[in-house]
Amino acid sequence: MIIVKIGGAAGVDVEHTCEDAAALWRAGNRLVLIHGGSDETNRLAEQLGQPPRFVTSVSGHTSRLTDRRTLEIFAMATAAINRRLVERLQALGVNAFGLSGIDGRLIEGRRKEAIRIVEHGRQRIVRDDWTGTPERVNRELLTSLLNAGLLLVVAPLAISPAGEMLNIDGDRGAAAIAGALRAETLILLTNVPGLLRRYPDENTLIRHLPRAALGDIGSSAEGRMRKKLLGAAEALAAGVQRVVISDGRLQAPISAALQGAGTVIE
């Protein structure tokens, strides 16, 4: 079982990723692809006259400020990405099936009803927030779809116990799915070669990272990479054997990651 998170930032080669996924699927591998949507959401938000806003939490994590309108824009953007991925995979002969975390309560999450942010050097509370933390995955639904021979393509949304749609971090959503399925490998594709010791110098790639070092490295990592390392830690804690943070710009990015390209954490 291979779980692949396709990063939502510009630069990841979606065409080559789909071709590689198709080849692996035809070879008998079971795959679940989870995609992001940050770059597409930014473009759509600008077009709709609601430019994206980003905030920094007191712990130093930067995230999209997601009020209800932004959540709806995010849902539209990720739906478009999901349809394009399924369309391309179907054209490659793959019986791909697209869904989001709200469908069939695939991913349940707890809504962050209030977040504490730092703005202009001062802390404040934001309450109109529609983000969540993945807490439960509908393993039975995933298994039934995979047993039907489908390659799954999942958009990064979740549903709260109260039935509220939530924006979730795609890396953590991928980690939750990988853990629920007891996947051998979770691959996090991004637009750099992997975890860099000195971002953005691509010559400083860290090829192997012990699980015990995740906390120390994560606290000093570049913003996007902190979330990937958090997702990696959650996946390993849930029983995933290894996590690979790898380059989504390669010709066969999934296969390269399976062969150890990027940063391997196990």
Image: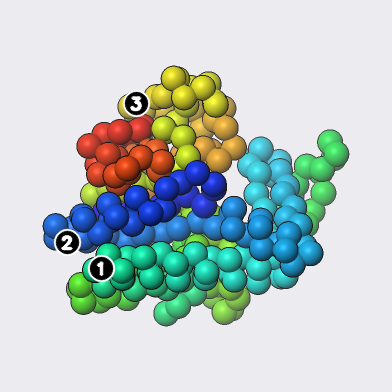
Q: Is residue 71 visible?
A: no
Mark nearer the viewer, 1 or 3: 1
Residue 99: name its quadrant.
Answer: bottom left
Q: Is residue 105 above or below residue 22?
A: below
Q: Identify the colour scheme used.
A: rainbow
How far across and down, in percent of the image, does residue 138 sit?
Answer: 37, 71
Q: Quarter of the image for the N terminus: give it.
A: bottom left
Q: Amino acid at mark 2?
A: Arg
Of callouts 1 and 3, the N-terminal one: 1
Q: Which one is earlier in the sequence, the residue at label 2 or at label 1?
A: 2
Q: Check contact, mark 2 vs mark 1: CB within 8 A.
A: yes
Mark 1 secondary-structure assignment:
loop
Amino acid on which the number 3 mark rests in the picture: Arg
Residue where numbered disc 3 is placed:
207
Crowd band around label 2 with a 10 angstrom C-alpha radius: few (<14), some (14–19), many (20+): few
Q: Which residue in the protein does label 2 denote? A: 26
Quadrant occupied by the C terminus: top left
Q: Residues within 10 Å of mark 3 (few under 14, many from 20)?
A: some
Q: With 44 as the anchor, is 212 left or right in this view?
A: left
Left or right position of 230 against 55: left
Q: What residue appears at the point 55 percent right and 58 percent down from the top-left corner?
A: 37
Q: Which residue is mark 1?
A: 94
Callout 2–callout 3 Cβ contact below 8 Å: no
Mark yes or no: residue 76 visible: yes
Q: Is residue 200 above or below residue 57?
A: above
The Cα–Cα distance between marks 2 and 3, rounded to whole angstroms, is 29 Å
